[in-house]
Amino acid sequence: MMITIPDFLTPDEVRQCREVLEKASWQDGRATAGDLAAKVKANLQLAPDDPLTRQLGDFILERLGRNDRFMAAALPLKVLPPRFNRYEGGGTYGNHVDNAIFSVPGTPHRIRSDISSTLFFSDPDEYDGGELVVEDTYGSHMVKLPAGHIILYPGTSLHRVTPVTRGVRFASFFWTQSLVREDSQRALLWELDESIRQVRMETPESEAAPRLMAVYHNLLRQWANT
């Protein structure tokens, strides 16, 4: 299941983040890649221990906790602190699958990468190329969203970033361990949640809404892993 959350950040929030990212100290992205990934990875990243990574990451985590659409789509149990990358001058990242398990820097904790997310800080007309391409059983899906928008997709997906041939592509990326491990189950809960929202909006007094809500929570109770 792929879900786009539009306007996750306001234009002013995007501008403030961009101003900081443009002045940041970037390092070779291969420093954080495994042996196989390093062979297809050509981008720049902020170091995990860079104070700016923590500052911007905490800002995004706070916004995630207040975003109803993210909470409904991801059903988060744990979120790995966000990281940041930069693509330019032909920078690319070939086909790969993200690690199944990530360690949380500076802690003994680990996170299972059920959901991958990319938050865009550059508008599509600022750069050529740089599409996020996600492959699943239904084919390849090309993603290039406006700044401030975020895309969620299964961590099991083979994906890549096409070469950036003009301009600069700034983004944040992170992983979520969901309360519901299976993507198919999360998809059903998402569709049910969307249907409940629509019923409540169109027919506020409908008796169907509480019944549907009961089904939702009983499914979540059955499928949740805490």
Image: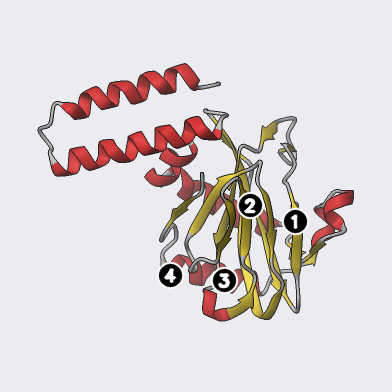
Q: Secondary structure at mark 4?
A: helix
Amino acid type shown at disc 1: Asn
Q: Earlier in the sequence, mark 3 or mark 2?
A: 3
Q: Secondary structure at mark 1?
A: strand
Which residue in the protein does label 2 denote?
A: 135
Q: Residue at x 40, y 38 (%)?
A: 190
Q: Where residue 12 is drawn, which disc sits there?
A: 4
Q: Is residue 210 left or right of residue 67?
A: left
Determine whether label 1 and label 2 are within 8 Å by CB.
Answer: yes
Q: Which of the two residues, 161 or 27, is positioned nearer the viewer here? A: 161
Q: Is residue 134 left or right of residue 224?
A: right
Q: Which image quadrant is residue 45 in?
A: bottom right
Can you say whether 167 is above or below 71 in the image? below
Q: Earlier in the sequence, mark 3 or mark 4?
A: 4
Specify few, some or many for label 4: CA neighbours under 10 Å numbering under 14, 14-19, or 20 or more: few
Q: Quadrant of the C terminus?
A: top right
Which residue in the protein does label 3 denote?
A: 18
